[in-house]
């Protein structure tokens, strides 16, 4: 069921912007591996995320970022490795499980059903129903109007299939779906890849706002400028392996580029198994 | 931040054409227009025979079986699948219920027991549903393409239909069961027809009123009041008009005389005008259409079916059990084939292993003419039923004109291709 009121509890957690290292990680993925047809897409990767923290996941196309994230969101099952949520071992084998733990994902493809309207997409798989078991479209539309008013105040096309919407509008629908259900962990896979400058700015503002509200965010991108502006830490992957992780303040953009391209771990970063 | 929900109190959709004010699907209007052209064209060509109560009554009965199956085919095509086996399933189910009511049940219940017909229908729905679920399981869980599974099914179930009695035709059917085929046993008569029509009109008005009240309560934009009134008037007019046509077709003299004698009514010299009223198979088709529309638009199941068709990966990532949903869609198709098998077996008053041959093509064509996109994700139950009516109108009109069977097939095939082309052009135009 939907929670009453706004989808984000304002100020429910301390808003400590400088990564609070001591706290229990919101999510920890330990030693995750998965192979497709003999090719190790993700090979022994360990990453973590704390409340109110933005972690940029960087790497070339095919480095294994999206695969790693799909394991966390329940789309793939890892061959080995464990996931901990709030320090407790989590069993995530289906997308539904991930959502149960408050892990929401905005996919690069947005994963919208193009033939269905905004409300249908936002509530897909979690429909509000009347006491008779039928779809409560009116309530869902009303809630959609509320959440969209916040993300995209000019949005009016509630009755049209999302196919008819612009790229930015579709993006807002995908974001609305992720944050409406009180997400605690948000995974954003290339959130700005298809957006213009104004819309990119809008997404950046949203990331900062959600971070302030104590939500942990994994930001996946191949564009390090994007990530440097928003992330507290970066983890870099190459050929399925973790090159290393670093606080953004401890490394330069050139050093991170070196991690991405050459797999070379600079002194300011903690090296992973993939460091060459 | 407060949502501007309360602020945007019912601004009626300001400008726009009449159609957009009424919020009527313009494609539906196009189909109705096409149907009108076909009907009037045939009426002119046949010298006024087509648009008679008698012909329209027959047309409605002939459409029922394919229309019922087309409602399930819509959902199957919406999920980006196809079912080529529906005619064969109809055939095997028809044979089984023929054997059940003519050879098995009389041994326990005696001939003409009142239980025979309900048991036969139950068997039809169960067997059809199980066949559909089995095929759905192969498609959804073993990931065999539906085209292949149901192409195999076409051969398997058609063969099985022959196997049931080694090819023998079974006749006649139980008297009560024959009502499912329409005809004299299955015509509801004038009074029942008017009552049903009145109830339908009441339901239309109540449904429109409730949906309007709901939208007002949530502060959503609503249609102008007169638009709702116009829609109610058109819908009720259509229902009452159909009832009047059905009631304007009297029983043939011989049957009417037998009917009168059975009730001890003296046969007047001028004959008796006993209206047939709506036929049972037509009523079943309408009810099936309403139930399927409800499933497709008001329940989570229908929402998932359309989501799978729109973007299978997104549906999966949303946590929808896409496989089970797909299996249910095929099971539902099987149930509808079972109902259609009852109607066509009863109408023929015999079970033959050839029943339903080529029905898969008519059913698919109905759904496609009715606006179901083979790319998936788009389609309506009402459109498919209208498509079935268009197909049957073409065929029955050509029979009326004495067109040879091969030419009939040529025309129907050409119309199918033409309809899909026109639809495609229309879709690109509105984008």
Image (cartoon, helix red, strand yellow):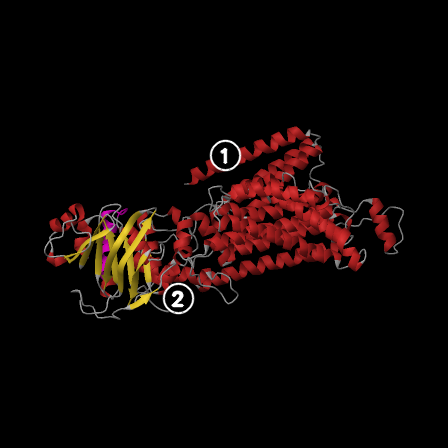
Marks 1/2 in contact by CB < 8 Å: the verdict is no
Residue A184 x/y as whole percent: 29, 65
Which segment is the magenta one?
Answer: A193-208
Q: From this view, report whether residue B320 is shown above or below residue A10.
A: above
Give the residue drawn at x 11%, y 55%: A251
Instruction: Please indicate whether residue B116 sits to the left or right of residue A231 in the image.
Output: right
Q: From this view, report whether residue B361 is shown above or below residue A74.
A: above
Q: Chain of mark 1?
A: B
Between A251 and B251, the one nearer to me in the picture: A251
Query: For numbered disc 2, what is the local secondary structure?
Result: loop
Q: Is residue B4 visible?
A: no
Q: CA distance from mark 1 to mark 2?
A: 44 Å
Q: Is residue B44 visible?
A: yes
Secondary structure mostly seen in magenta is helix
* Viewport quadrant of the N terminus of chain B: bottom left
Q: Quarter of the image holding residue A149? A: bottom left
Badge 1 crowding class, 10 Å Cα cut-off, few under 14, some 14 to 19, many 20 or more, is few
Between A73 and B66, the one nearer to me in the picture: A73
Does the magenta-highlighted stretch encompass residue A203?
yes
Please state the total of marks drawn on the protein image. Answer: 2
Q: From this view, report whether residue B71 is shown above or below residue A131.
A: above
Q: Which residue is mark 2?
A: A2
Q: Quarter of the image holding residue B400? A: top right
Q: Quarter of the image holding residue A10? A: bottom left
Residue A89 x/y as whole percent: 31, 66
Q: Which residue is mark 1?
A: B421
Q: Chain of mark 2?
A: A
Instruction: Please indicate whether residue A90 sits to the left or right of residue B17 in the image.
Output: left
Residue A249 x/y as whole percent: 12, 58
């Amino acid at each position: 069921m939907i929670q009453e009121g706004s989808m984000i509890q304002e100020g429910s957690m301390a808003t400590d912007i400088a990564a609070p290292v001591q706290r229990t990680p919101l999510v920890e993925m330990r030693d995750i591996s998965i192979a497709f047809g003999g090719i190790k897409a993700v090979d022994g990767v360990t990453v973590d995320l704390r409340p109110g923290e933005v972690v940029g996941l960087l790497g070339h196309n095919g480095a294994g970022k999206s695969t790693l994230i799909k394991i966390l969101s329940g789309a793939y099952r890892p061959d080995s490795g464990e996931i901990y949520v709030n320090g407790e071992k989590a069993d995530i084998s289906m997308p539904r499980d991930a959502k149960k733990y408050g892990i929401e994902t905005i996919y690069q493809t947005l994963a919208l059903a193009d033939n269905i309207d905004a409300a249908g997409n936002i509530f897909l798989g979690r429909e509000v129903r009347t006491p008779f078991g039928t779809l409560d479209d009116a309530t869902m539309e009303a809630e959609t109007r509320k959440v969209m008013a916040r993300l995209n105040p000019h949005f009016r096309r509630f009755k049209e299939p999302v196919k008819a919407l612009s790229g930015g509008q579709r993006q807002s629908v995908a974001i609305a779906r992720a944050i409406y259900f009180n997400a605690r962990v948000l995974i954003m896979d290339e959130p700005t890849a298809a957006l213009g400058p104004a819309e990119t700015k809008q997404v950046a503002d949203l990331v900062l706002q959600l971070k302030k509200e104590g939500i942990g965010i994994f930001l996946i991108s191949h564009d390090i400028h994007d990530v440097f502006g928003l992330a507290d830490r970066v983890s870099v992957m190459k050929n399925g392996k973790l090159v290393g992780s670093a606080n953004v303040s401890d490394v330069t953009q050139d050093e991170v580029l070196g991690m991405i391209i050459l797999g070379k771990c600079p002194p300011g970063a903690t090296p992973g198994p993939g460091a060459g | 931040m407060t949502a501007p929900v309360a602020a945007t109190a019912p601004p009626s959709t300001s400008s726009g054409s009449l159609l957009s004010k009424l919020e009527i699907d313009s494609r539906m209007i196009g189909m109705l227009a096409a149907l009108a052209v076909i009907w009037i064209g045939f009426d002119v060509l046949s010298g006024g025979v087509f648009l008679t109560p008698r012909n329209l009554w027959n047309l409605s009965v002939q459409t029922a079986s394919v229309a019922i199956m087309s409602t399930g085919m819509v959902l199957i095509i919406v999920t980006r699948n196809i079912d080529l086996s529906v005619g064969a399933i109809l055939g095997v189910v028809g044979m089984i219920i023929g054997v059940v009511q003519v050879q098995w049940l009389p041994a326990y219940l005696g001939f003409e027991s009142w239980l025979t017909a309900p048991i036969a229908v139950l068997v039809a729905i169960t067997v059809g549903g199980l066949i559909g679920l089995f095929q759905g399981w192969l498609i959804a869980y073993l990931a065999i393409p539906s085209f292949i599974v149901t192409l195999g099914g076409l051969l398997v179930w058609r063969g099985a239909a022959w196997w049931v009695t080694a090819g023998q035709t079974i006749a006649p059917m139980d008297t009560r069961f024959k009502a499912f085929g329409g005809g004299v046993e299955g015509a509801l008569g004038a009074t029942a027809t008017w009552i049903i029509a009145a109830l339908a009109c009441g339901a239309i008005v109540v449904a429109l009123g409730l949906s309007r009240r709901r939208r007002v309560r949530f502060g959503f934009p609503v249609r102008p009041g007169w638009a709702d009134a116009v829609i109610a008037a058109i819908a009720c007019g259509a229902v009452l008009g159909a009832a009047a046509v059905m009631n304007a077709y009297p029983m043939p003299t011989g049957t009417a005389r037998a009917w009168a004698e059975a009730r001890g009514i003296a046969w007047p010299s001028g004959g008796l005008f006993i209206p047939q009223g709506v036929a049972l198979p037509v009523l079943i088709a309408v009810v099936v259409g309403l139930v399927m529309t409800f499933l497709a638009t008001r329940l989570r199941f229908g929402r998932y079916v359309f989501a799978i068709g729109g973007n299978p990966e997104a549906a999966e990532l949303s946590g929808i059990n896409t496989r089970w949903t797909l299996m249910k869609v095929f099971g539902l198709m099987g149930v509808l084939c079972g109902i259609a098998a009852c109607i066509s077996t009863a109408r023929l008053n015999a079970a033959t292993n050839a029943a339903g041959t080529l029905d898969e093509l008519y059913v698919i064509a109905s759904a496609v003419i009715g606006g179901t996109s083979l790319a998936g994700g788009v389609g309506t139950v009402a459109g498919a039923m209208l498509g079935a009516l268009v197909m049957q109108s073409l065929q029955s009109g050509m029979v009326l004109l004495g067109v040879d069977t091969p030419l009939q097939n040529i025309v129907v095939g050409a119309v199918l291709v033409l309809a899909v082309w026109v639809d495609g052009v229309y879709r690109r135009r509105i984008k």
